Image (cartoon, rainbow, N blue to C red):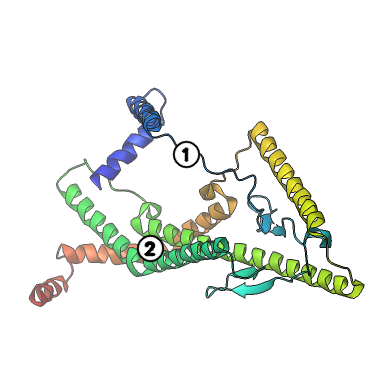
Amino acid sequence: MTAGYKFLTLLAKGQIEKSPEHSEILRHLQKRNETADFSRLIHPHRKSPSKQWRNPPLLTKVSAPGEFPKYEPTVRPLPKTAFVGKRKVPVFGHTAELMSFLRIKKPQPENLSRSLGAKTVRFREVIHTTKRVDTELFSAAASEDLWDGIMHRLLHANGDTVGERRDGPLESFYFSTTLTKAWWEMKLLRINEDWMARSEAQSKLVEQERALAQDEKQSGVGPTDPKVAKGNLDQILAEYRRKKTELEQEIEENGTNLFQDPFSSPRWLKKVEKLEIEELEQNGKRQGRQNKKIREFFGEDEHAESRRRNFHEKW
């Protein structure tokens, strides 16, 4: 904890441009960059395969940052002239976690299985972490706040002002844990919203494919020549890649930063504000219970001595 407080002090003072701490941080970053450049010279980074010729994703996210997720099919449904044989309508599939996906061909592609597995692992990790906050971190946070209260009283009794107690309920370990739980719950909610948006887009795609398959069956359209189908499909994919390249160049030229700090999003800030109000309203009872435990620790409660004796006899 001492090291943690020292780093917090260093980072806080480092925000002042002409402070010694600011210069120290800059020197550290510069030295780190030099070390990284030297490491890259010794072990050059291999370039990953170009993404240009990879198959386009089934769905593309079209919603703006901060909006409810929305997806649309990237290039599907394909026209009849872009493939050989009859149109095969995708089949819905669901994982044990109710994540929807589409089976377009058999056997199931390895990339699809790997993607579903990775998403399932991340989802379960979020669930596990959210539960752990309730089962472990809240009790640990209450113990840390109690320990801080005891240490503050001991220091105050000895006239020691080296360690300053954090004032206010919003600076307690308990409230930090409350924010931690809220963050993981919101992360879980965002995953659920994303899955719902993907499922809705997949459902619309299946309906479109089914309608086209019915029309093609009724019209009696014959099979497409393989060479013609390949040429039409290549043209569709080339158009997709061209639009994607233009969009990436436009973003780079405009200097648009696609990174969105989740801790600065209006949704999260609104949630934090609500939790702060609730904490200030409920802190009185919690602080009263903590003060009672501190009095018991110092033997000021009338039943404290008997509890302490029973505790030592038990252990």
Could you tell me which quadrant the C terminus lies in?
Answer: bottom left
Residue at image location 52% in from the left, 55% down from the top: 273
Q: For residue 40, which quarter of the picture?
A: top left
Q: Nearer the viewer, residue 114 or 188?
A: 114
Drawn side of residue 269 relative to residue 212, left or right: left
Q: Position of residue 229 (x, y in %)?
A: 79, 57
Q: For residue 217, which quarter of the picture?
A: bottom right
Vertical side of 229 occupied by 6: above or below:
above
Q: Position of residue 203 (x, y in %)?
A: 71, 70
Residue assigned mark 1: 46
Drawn side of residue 109 relative to residue 86, left or right: left
In this view, which residue lies farthest toward the right? 219
Q: Residues within 10 Å of mark 1 (few under 14, many from 20)?
A: few
Q: Position of residue 216 (x, y in %)?
A: 86, 70
Vertical side of 56 occupied by 39: above or below:
above
Residue at image location 41% in from the left, 31% down from the top: 15
Residue assigned mark 2: 284
